[in-house]
Image (cartoon, rainbow, N blue to C red):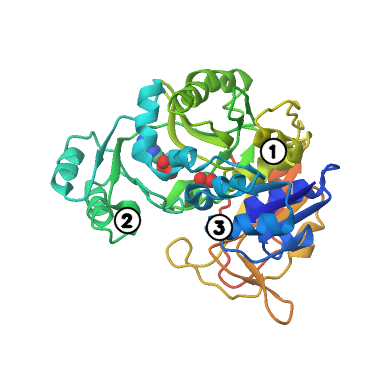
Amino acid sequence: MRILVLGSGGREHALAWAFARSAEVDEVVCAPGNPGMAAVGRCIPVDVADPAAVAQLADDLDADLTVVGAEVPLVAGVVDAVEARGRLAFGPRAAGARLEGSKAWMKEVLAAAGVPTADHATFGAGEEEQALAHLDRLPGLYIVKTDGLAAGKGVVVTESIAEARDAVREYLSGEAFGDAGRRIVIEEGLTGPEVSLLVLCDGADGAVALAPAQDFKRIGDGDAGPNTGGMGAYSPVPAAPDAMVDELMRTAVIPTLTELRERGVEYRGILYAGLMLTPTGPKVLEYNVRFGDPECEVVVPRLRSDLARHCLEAAQGRIGTPVAFADEACVTVVLATEGYPAAPRSGDVIEGVDAAEAHDGVLVFHAGTTRDAAGALRTAGGRVLNVTALGPSIEAARARAYAACAEISWPGMQYRRDIAASP
Ligand code: AMP
Ligand code: GLY
């Protein structure tokens, strides 16, 4: 089969890498891809958020399966456009992707499905006074979120009411995130460890949880500083054993899929539940409609069954092949540029990737990289590389990942030193 992978991040590199190892895959094509993906497949430029352009590309390539990496193309309806050409695509259609495209709608679905989640209120443009008054009634941990997509950065979690008030004003005015922020969700603050559960769904009654992962969203060690797209991850998660995964499927994921079906949405692809294990039980913080990044980079390398087969079956609407994971642990550390997440610097020459990849059990997935005319690898974005290692335990995988990180350098490179330090 010929698989078209849409995207250019560490997640898409991990997916393309896994597809290239499948006995069922003859060719991996990446669009637009990145220098790391170019090592596993042909790369072709495309605007991934343009459904017509993607559908045309799938046709031109005669792609048997199109796998969509990120939420923006899913919300834009890329799967609908590819399916309209009679071709298979992995990911939800726009109607299902709305779960990530609108946090207010997601909360409505969760409430209707009876899924435990943080209490919330929604406010639109012109409701700033009401939103600020609502903050005053909250007990001291303030959560303000944009309704729409904001690349993982539209969430403020703060104990400072002044900061929460600023977020309300900047979001609702459109100043911070444009239209995505003109509607906001304010939530009660929850506490506890977080778990990301990625569930493979076939739109009928097939839903299989992949191995849980935990990511690290804040920029700094000890969870200091602003939220990012994710600075590292590990899998498995000792705080989320099999029995808990079963409970999460029963109390959160299955009721959500059932509620969606009752609304006429056959949800197909990955449903990513972001959960907090609170003192009063697990609660859903959010749903995403695709593999997590960097969770994908620690879940996929542990997979022993064939990812291409799983994605094909889900796209066809009937999961059958059992999902199997290695006992090995996996840790990924994100290497980011100076200034990330506020103002990432680009264009620096990256040294040492080959030396890092030569380490035992290490894979380096590219995200924000580019090759210049002379063939040198340069930074091109905030999150640049995912240095990933498998090992017999989380500790061993962690030690391997950090030893490999020490091989890589460029001016201003930054990364967290505490990924998977106390799982
Ligand atoms: P989200 O994009 O909704 O997952 O939010 C990003 C991050 O903000 C989460 O991974 C949590 O660390 C934090 N967060 C979101 N909602 C809450 C909440 N209600 N209480 C505490 N932390 C939260
Ligand atoms: N790592 C968080 C996300 O993919 O949304």
> Which residue matches tag 1?
311
Q: What's the amino acid at mark 2?
A: Asp
Q: Secondary structure beneath disc 3?
A: helix
Residue ID for mark 3? 52
* Quadrant of the rendering where the C terminus is positioned: top right
Q: What residue type is labelled 1?
A: Cys
Q: Tag 3: residue type?
A: Ala
Q: Answer yes or no: do the residues labelled 1 and 2 have beta carbons within 8 Å?
A: no
- Position of residue 235 measured from the top left corner of the image (x, y, whole percent): 65, 36
Q: Which residue is drawn at 70% across and 50% down?
A: 14
Dot 3 alpha-carbon crowd within 10 angstroms: few under 14, some 14 to 19, many 20 or more? some
Label 2–label 3 contact, CB within 8 A:
no
Q: Nearer the viewer, residue 23 or 189?
A: 23
Q: x and y percent of residue 105 in the render? A: 36, 36
What number is the disc on residue 83? none
Q: Which of 316 and 59 lies nearest the eye of the viewer?
A: 59
Q: Position of residue 65 (x, y in %)?
A: 70, 46
Residue placed furthest toward the right: 23
Q: Earlier in the sequence, mark 1 or mark 3?
A: 3
What is the crowding at mark 1: few (fewer than 14 residues within 10 Å), some, or many (at least 20)?
A: many
Q: Is residue 54 left or right of residue 175?
A: right
- Is residue 326 visible in the rendered image? The answer is yes
Q: How far apart are marks 1 and 2 (CA)?
A: 33 Å
* Mark 1–mark 3 distance (CA, rounded to whole Å): 22 Å
Front one among 365 and 1:
1
Mark 1 vs 2, N-terminal side: 2
Residue at 52% of width from left, 47% of height from top? 74
Q: Which of marks 1 and 3 is in front?
A: 3
What residue is pinned by disc 2? 179
